[in-house]
Image (cartoon, grey):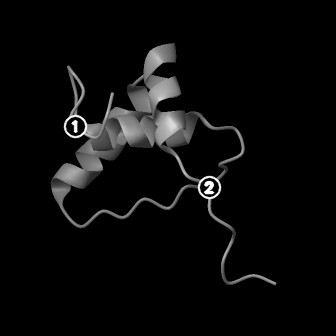
Amino acid sequence: MGHRDPPGGNFAIHQLAWLLARPEVTAPVIGVTRPRHLADALSACELELSADDRAALERAYVPHRVAGFE
């Protein structure tokens, strides 16, 4: 999938859909500064990613340590 807009949608929507589908993510914080951002977030709630799309996003994800909590 890469970091370009996938066929039939934009990359931000696919990223949000992947995040929302992860069971360990219970409360994603999604910033909205433009009406388009809200529309993207709502579209992500309805998008079901294919197994190939999920795998591509998993490969691109780099885990980070939690910061700010001890």
Q: Quadrant of the N terminus?
A: top left
| Residue type indicated by callout 1 | Arg
Residue 50 visible, this angle = no
**Residue 16 % position (x, y):** 42, 43
The residue nearer to you, when weighing 30 against 54, is 54
Q: Residue 42: which numbered mark, if any? A: none
Q: Which residue is mark 1?
A: 4
Residue 24 lies, with reference to residue 18, above or below; the image says below
Residue 30 lies, with reference to residue 21, above or below; the image says below
**Residue 70 % position (x, y):** 82, 84
Q: Tell me which label, 2 or 1, sits earlier in the chain.
A: 1
Q: Residue at x 30, y 44 (%)?
A: 12
Label 2: element kind: loop
Q: Residue at x 50, y 26 (%)?
A: 54
**Residue 67 % position (x, y):** 66, 78
Confirm or deny contact between disc 2 and disc 1 (CB under 8 A).
no
- In the figure, is residue 49 to the left or right of 1? right
The residue nearer to you, when weighing 61 against 31, is 61
Pointer 1: residues within 10 angstroms few (<14), some, or many (20+)?
A: few
Q: Residue at x 36, y 34 (%)?
A: 14
Q: Quadrant for residue 40, please give it.
A: top left
Q: Which residue is mark 2?
A: 63
Q: Residue at x 40, y 26 (%)?
A: 46
**Residue 3 % position (x, y):** 28, 41
Residue 48 lies, with reference to residue 58, above or below; the image says above
Whole-number angstrom distance, CA of label 2 to CA of label 1: 21 Å
Q: Quadrant for residue 41, please give it.
A: top left
- The mark total stands at 2
| Residue type indicated by callout 2 | Pro
Label 1: element kind: loop
- In the figure, is residue 35 to the left or right of 11? left
Q: Quadrant for residue 30, please give it.
A: bottom left
